[in-house]
Amino acid sequence: MNTTWKIVVLVILLFVLILPDFLMQGTGEAGAASRTLMWSIVNTPSENISAVIVSPSEINAFALGSDGRTFYCCDTADNLTSNWQPTSFPGLGVDEYISCLDISKKYGAGLRDIAVGTRNATSSGRIFNAQYSTAFAASWNNQGLAENITAIKFSPNYATDSTIAVVSCNAVAAFLHLGKHDPVTNTTSWDAPGYVNYPVDFSLQLPAIIPTENSTNIINCDLELPSDFSGSTATEIASFVSILTDTTSKSVVLYVNTNIAPSVLNITPPFSTIIPNNGIYSIAYKGSLSSGMLLAGEKAAKAGDGRVKIWQCSNPQSTVTGGATWLPSNTLKSPTGGGNSGRANAILAWSTDGTSVYCGTSSENAIVGGTGWAPGQWPRSKLTSVPLDESAFSRSTDSGISWNQLSLIDTRISRLSDVAALDVPTGSGGEGEHNVLYLATLNTEPGLINFDSVWRSVSDTAGQVWERVLIW
């Protein structure tokens, strides 16, 4: 569709250029001297330009590379390329699926550990770990935690504390475990004496709030650790956990600190319960044990709105009941998604320097707890795809209040509606020393709820890089 528009515009411009001299006269200051006006094509947002628009597109997971600039996004794909190094990962059991993974920071002689968690229908998932430098020289070892693994994180100070944090569940309850890993034997000692009051059984800590959260009703969980978390010192152990279920309570966000009483505090943001099947899908934290910023992304989007709410909390360590203060993202400037499905599943991650936060959305239909292949159940829910649902990869530079869509936007441009250029003089201190271009587009796809868009280009060559700043 974008290519067609370029051709039409070019034909019109060429027609203008070959007009007779007398038609070019009297045009005022808008034109140059006769027959010297030169035109060039400005690219509009498209799949060919930095994959700004990609339909269908479902961001089911993404990771930020160690360089702070490279992103890796998991889409719902029908095939895979062969440009991957084999890891000799062990074969899994019947109806056992990989649910999460994490990569440690370097330790020793430039080594890293890679941990992979699994889930199955009998609540007997596993954790496998392998050591990695430039190749998989070591084998994968089962780390001996026979529960469904829903989230896993290496300590940010793994080089000194060798600690792995895990959120898991069995048929009775959900837990937070800490493990001390031995890199020599590639084994892990779970909830060792140095980890005071671990494991944390959430059903015992908050019986009135999450009494029966277990492997039969949990959809997914998330786990975040402060930057100065250290499993070597009891007073430097704390974390944030989110649990999403298919039960009436649906979802909780928890602050876990076994050095205080109570050791588990419910800090769930006031997400909308009017929206069907809503809850908190993911969390992201930047900061230390004492202070920082916690974000929480909602699962569902209001029907026909095409935006999903993100919550921001600047005091998530508050020990006062109800003391955690949450602010919602801007109504018009929230990440986009769920335009036609009502499902957005906001996945959040901070940049390495903490100046930006990123969000990926998808139309995953995760409404049934447990593990299996029933409709709406994980992992089958990951294969759900609704075209032109406004799923996208978004960025915020104000800690999650306002967002722009950068790429992988599941939308369509049917018409170019209007264009405006803002001239930023050299040395003015404006948005770069080049022109800012705005473009309004219409989406008239039949049979769907359509969303029009406003785009902005601030690239040195106008039109080379676009971001979407508004939909309606």
Image (cartoon, helix red, strand yellow):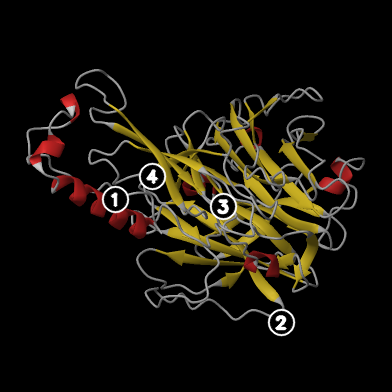
**Residue 196: % across, % down:** 73, 42
Q: CA distance from mark 3 to mark 4?
A: 23 Å
Kindly give the residue lying farthest to the right in the view shown.
208
Q: Residue at x 82, y 55 (%)?
A: 246
Tell me which numbered mark, 3 or 2, is placed earlier along the sequence. Answer: 2
Q: Residue at x 46, y 65 (%)?
A: 131
Foreground disc of the pair 1, 3: 1
Q: CA distance from mark 4 to mark 1?
A: 38 Å
**Residue 35: % across, % down:** 7, 41
Q: Is disc 1 placed on a helix, strand or loop? A: helix
Residue 68: mark in rendering:
4
Mark yes or no: residue 351 visible: no
At label 2, the amino acid type is Val
Res. 429 image quadrant: top left
The answer to whether 244 appears left or right of 32 in the picture is: right
Residue 391: mark in rendering:
3
Q: Which residue is mark 1?
A: 9
Task: Give the number of marks.
Answer: 4
Q: Is disc 4 placed on a helix, strand or loop? A: loop
At label 4, the amino acid type is Gly
Res. 182 image quadrant: bottom right
Q: Which residue is mark 2?
A: 94
> Depth check: 226 or 78 in front?
78
